[in-house]
Image (cartoon, rainbow, N blue to C red):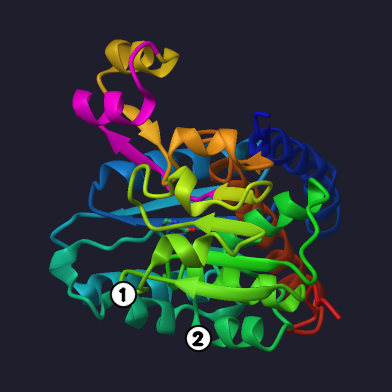
Amino acid sequence: MAARILDGQALATRLQVDIIPEVQAFIGRHGRPPGLAIVLVGHDPASEVYVRSKVRTASAIGFRVDLERLPATAALGDLFTLVDRLNLSEAHDGILVQSPLPAAMGPEAEPQVFDRLLPAKDVDGFSPHNVGLLVQNRASVVSGTPAGVVELLEWEGVPIAGQRAVVIGRSDIVGKPLAMLLLHRHATVTICHSRTSDLAAVCREADILVAAVGRPGLVTPAFVKPGAVVVDVGINRITDWAQVEGLFGAGHPRLAQFQRKGSLLVGDVHPGVGAVAAALTPVPGGVGPLTVAMLMRNTLVAARARLERQPAGAGRQHP
Ligand code: GUN
């Protein structure tokens, strides 16, 4: 039987619609909307797409949103100066520095920038303070993609407590925080990575399997226990016809889509997994839209905490 599709787009739309009256109420109380600053350094094509979607959604739900751009040649000091200004800005409740930063800024640039963000305005939950609160299960703001994955699982009624969850990928943005969120919901969690031996065998143990590595089609049916729930966090743009044909097989409708557009967005999960899994997130339209929706919620939470003096760390905890 074909896997049930977990429709992240539908949930994201619903979350965004639900937030609009809350934004209106905030404006009524404070005379201004929640303010979000998005910092984009350089012109990474994927980041351009993500940032456009964040700006569009934020303004659609009534936030003030300011896109602050720096050239790819900017020095780290320029970025620090911008972050310092936004930290002090009265109008901005949330700051997001889009990752990745240009490679020329060096491997330590991102952690240094996240160190510099005021934790109260860190709507990505990337600052060490907020990561610490997450580890202790008392975060009010959690990185959008992992928060979105859990939101979708809970919305779809997928049991988490007592289940075996395997997360492929150990990034600070997705893999590690997602493992924490699943652990706090009482899953037994394994994190896999590039040095995991017999990856397929470890993944076959999973009741919930999450792929977040950025390798098209990595998770084949051989990785999946029949009846597992599979979450595909990968968003890979492929431009090679042979790779598309290898993934989807001759005659698949997505081949025609590739021919029209010259490229295709695919996840880390092979299309054949749909015949083995009980439920599966699509790419596009699965986890991606939820990342944006959770960012909106985080910005509203940060704005309320700043202006309504709610105690820091009074987050969503899971006993
Ligand atoms: N790059 C990819 N995902 C994200 C995200 O959730 N936040 C930021 N700041 N950068 C990203």
269, 46: nearer the viewer: 269
Mark 1 or mark 2, whichever is nearer to me? 1
**Within the magenta stretch, is there residue 136?**
no
Residue at image location 13% in from the left, 67% down from the top = 104
- Residue 61, disc: none
- Residue 195, disc: 1
Residue density around tag 2, few if under 14, some if 14–19, many if 20 or more, within 10 Å: some
- In three-dimensional space, the C-alpha distance between marks 1 and 2, rounded to whole angstroms, equals 26 Å
Is the distance from the Cβ of mark 1 to the nearest ligand 1 atom less than 8 Å?
no
Question: Residue 127: x percent and y percent?
Answer: 50, 80
- Range of residues picked out in magenta: 232-251
Question: Residue 297: x percent and y percent?
Answer: 70, 56
86, 295: nearer the viewer: 295
Left or right? Give the position of 195 relative to 84. Answer: left
Of the residues shown, which amino acid type is indicated by label 2?
Answer: Pro
Question: Residue 87: x percent and y percent?
Answer: 49, 75
Residue at image location 73% in from the left, 39% down from the top = 11
208, 69: nearer the viewer: 208
Vertical side of 99 occupied by 240: above or below: above
The reply to whether residue 123 is visible in this rendering is: no
Decide which of tag 1 and tag 2 comes sooner along the chain.
Answer: 2
* The quarter of the displayed image where residue 136 is located: bottom right
Residue at image location 57% in from the left, 34% down from the top = 274
Vertical side of 124 occupied by 62: above or below: above
Residue density around tag 1, few if under 14, some if 14–19, many if 20 or more, within 10 Å: few
Vertical side of 169 occupied by 69: above or below: above
Q: Quadrant of the C terminus?
A: bottom right
Vertical side of 278 occupied by 240: above or below: above
Residue located beneath label 2 in the image: 128
Residue at image location 70% in from the left, 78% down from the top = 139
| Image-quarter location of ligand 1 | bottom left
